Amino acid sequence: MLSSLQNIFRMGELRHKVLFTLAMLLVFRFGSHVPVPGIDATAMERLFQQGGLLGFLDLFAGGALKRFSIFAMGIAPYINASIIMQLLTVVIPRLGELAKQGEEGRKVMTQYIRYGTVVLGALQAFGMSFWLKNMGVIPNFNLGTSLVIVITLTAGTAFLMWLGEMITGNGIGNGISILIFAGIVANLPGGVAQTISLIKVGGVNLIALGAFLIIAIVVIGAVIFTNEGQRRIPVQYAKRVVGRKVYGGQSTHIPLKLNQAGVIPVIFASSILLFPATIAQFFPGVFLANTIKNLFSPQSALYNVLYALLIVFFTYFYTAIVFNPVEMADNLKKYSGFVPGIRPGKSTAEYIERVATRITLAGAVFLAFIAVLPTVLIGLTGVQTFYFGGTGLLIVVGVTLDTMKQLEAHLMMKQYEGFMK
């Protein structure tokens, strides 16, 4: 492992990518501590001491919401805009055609998502300003103060979107996922310190905490195993004679991942479910708003059932977007490849789709199970010291694996020893 880390800094291009990513994360953490003007920090802290949904929302913002910094909204408007755009590609034929036009189409789609992020960010910031006014966090509320807060928060989200794109283009890993990962990990030291303080005063049962940690380690291992799991479809290539040379004749396989969507379904599902409760927060004291807030609390039964169902849905939805069995079957046929016992062409596409549907179901159910498991464990053991849960666990493990794979690929290109033995 140490030698692999040394190899990273021996490669000029890879060293630049890693250092650039770290520099962007430092900017992200710095911005998380720059407060929005006009906010009463003491009143904001008292609001968070009430607990509830705010702690879960702050999980993705890395503490920026609790401090109400310029990055308080995090990258949530960008994720919501991406979800809306992905769904519209199915409904609107024009957007569906753009999604299939390769790099140029993706550029146009990305531009639409950027515009959508700014619009959604402004609406969310506007709602937050009125909510904070009602909660007594903005002492001198007027039109000017509201505009400053809306512009500052929207600009902060737009800057995070740009930061994520810069990491994706010039750094290592998916920039948006890296920012979410950094926000979650930033909460861990405070959570650990809080746990230790509770242990000292007897607020946490040591046996329950030990059991919780053992189960967490087992779950992390299961998540890694599932993310790396594959179903290999055997492929045989027929021999072809071109001039005086003979090509083909070898056997290989098509690796179909058990979880092809990665952590995207978890991020999408949590973003959608947080939306009703977030809107309800803007109307304190209203009976309907309080009912919605309680129903969509991360600890409620309804939230966890809907969360599991949405994860399954988005796993299939995202897999259908990124995985095309017809194109795969056509490529096999073009190069004289075939699956033993299956006719080339349409039959091969149907077979690959059938296999992908089955393994996707297993991957989706596993994701949903892991996402709601910590809530069940918290209810059984009573250990609830900080908001991490299945959502944070899946995102952290998934992003770590994806980033390590990218580092591995760069190292192997230069014939260096990688991380994964």
Image (cartoon, helix red, strand yellow):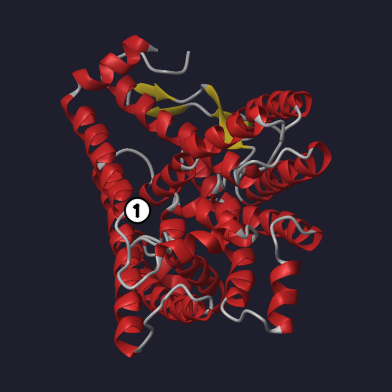
Q: Position of residue 297 (x, y in %)?
A: 70, 62
* Residue lying at the far left of the rendered structure: 12
Name which residue lies at 40% across and 73% down: 121
Q: Is residue 32 above or below residue 134?
A: above
Residue placed most toward the observer, 119 or 49: 49
* Residue lying at the far bottom of the rendered structure: 143
Which residue carries the number 1 mark? 32
Q: Quadrant of residue 362?
A: top right
Residue placed most toward the observer, 78 or 252: 78
Name which residue lies at 60% across and 65% down: 274
Residue placed most toward the observer, 371 or 85: 371
Q: Position of residue 386 (x, y in %)?
A: 60, 43
Quarter of the picture holding the N terminus? top left
Q: Position of residue 326 (x, y in %)?
A: 57, 53
Q: Quadrant of residue 48?
A: bottom right
Q: Is residue 420 above or below residue 44?
A: above
Q: Is residue 271 above or below residue 331?
A: below
Q: SS class of the residue under badge 1?
A: loop
Q: For label 1, count other residues whose C-alpha is less than 10 Å away and answer few (under 14), some (14-19) or many (20+).
A: many
Name which residue lies at 78% across and 29% down: 208
* Residue lying at the far front of the rendered structure: 201
Q: Position of residue 55 (x, y in %)?
A: 57, 55
Q: Amino acid at mark 1?
A: Ser
